[in-house]
């Protein structure tokens, strides 16, 4: 394909018939411009790979500074401005197994009584519940309530947790540890065992849950890193759905 033809196809790239769009009946009105291809690819991801035991849930921010009423600002992210997605990734490879995109997304009805952060995790993990997986999360998602639900569905979890979370129980391992700063972790699969880590200054002991969290939580970060190597649409693109297409394809 010639460069000129590629640019022409990219210019007129479109995925839906706008005349048939009805906001009241659409499952995700904010993503209607890319919904068919998004649903197809999301379903394909989960069919192509059976993930290893450890999976991670985290958010990813696709850089976008165009005109869009629901783009978000997250100063902690490298992109800062853009479209946020929640991803379930295999921790070892960074493979995207499932993805939820867009503000106002409707999660599964059976989880409506739970906090949004728990709805995200359980909606992404639904096909994997009861199969012996272990999901790694940061303190935005982790809570004793969510851990109890996951354990009841034969799914373990560990990750950082906010110390002021309600209902901190005795049956779950809660640990506070300080290296450069204090970090609190929750786990249903670890105890208080330490492991030896080689540092420049010598051998140091570190809680096993901290070591494994650092090794397994980076699934979504691997996705973001790989995407920066192949940016098919520059940040100045006008149509968000075209950039989203090239990001998830």
Image: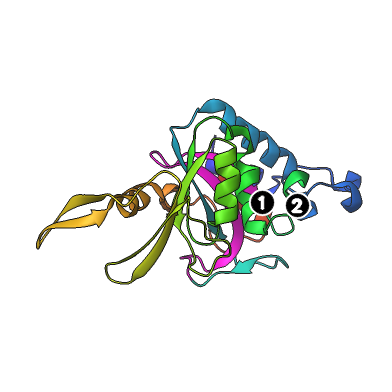
The image shows residue 35, relative to residue 83, as above or below, that is above
Which residue appears at 76% of the width and 55% of the height? 30
Locate residue 36, reporting x and y percent. 74, 39
Residue 38's image quarter?
top right
Please, what is the dominant secondary structure of the magenta stretch? Answer: strand
Q: Which of the two residues, 170 or 241, is positioned nearer the viewer here?
A: 170
Using residue 86 as the reference point, say whether residue 68 is left or right of it: right
**Do the residues bearing badges 2 and 1 touch, measured as CB atoms within 8 Å?**
yes
Q: Which of the two residues, 12 or 102, is positioned nearer the viewer here?
A: 102
The image shows residue 67, relative to residue 135, as above or below, that is below
For residue 7, say whether it is visible. no
Mark 2 or mark 1: whose residue is earlier in sequence? 2
Residue 119's disc is: 1
Which residue appears at 48% of the width and 46% of the height? 157
Q: Which of the two residues, 162 or 97, is positioned nearer the viewer here?
A: 162
In the rendered structure, does residue 126 fall within the stretch colored magenta? no
- According to the picture, the residue beneath numbered tag 2 turns out to be 112
Using residue 184 as the reference point, say whether residue 127 is left or right of it: right
Q: Secondary structure at mark 1?
A: helix
């Amino acid at each position: 394909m010639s460069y000129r033809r590629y640019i022409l196809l990219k210019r007129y790239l479109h995925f839906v018939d706008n005349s048939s769009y009805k906001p009241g009946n659409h499952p995700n009105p904010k993503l209607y411009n890319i919904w068919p291809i998004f649903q197809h690819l999301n379903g394909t991801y989960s069919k192509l790979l059976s993930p290893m035991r450890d999976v991670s849930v985290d958010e990813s921010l696709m850089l976008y500074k165009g005109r869009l009423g629901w783009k978000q600002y997250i100063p902690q992210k490298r992109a800062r401005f853009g479209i946020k997605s929640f991803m379930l990734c295999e921790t070892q490879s960074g493979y995207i197994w499932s993805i939820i995109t867009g503000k106002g997304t409707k999660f599964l009805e059976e989880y409506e009584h739970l906090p949004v952060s728990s709805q995200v995790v359980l909606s992404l993990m639904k096909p994997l519940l009861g199969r012996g997986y272990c999901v790694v999360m940061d303190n935005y998602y982790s809570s004793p309530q969510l851990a109890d639900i996951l354990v009841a569905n034969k799914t373990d979890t560990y990750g950082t947790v906010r110390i002021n979370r309600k209902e901190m129980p005795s049956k779950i391992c809660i640990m506070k540890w300080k290296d450069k700063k204090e970090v609190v972790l929750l786990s249903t699969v670890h105890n208080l065992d330490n492991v030896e880590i080689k540092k420049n200054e010598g051998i140091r002991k570190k809680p096993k849950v901290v070591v494994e969290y650092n090794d397994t939580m980076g699934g979504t970060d691997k996705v973001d890193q790989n995407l920066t190597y192949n940016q098919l649409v520059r940040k100045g693109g006008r149509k968000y759905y075209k950039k989203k297409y090239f990001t998830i394809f």
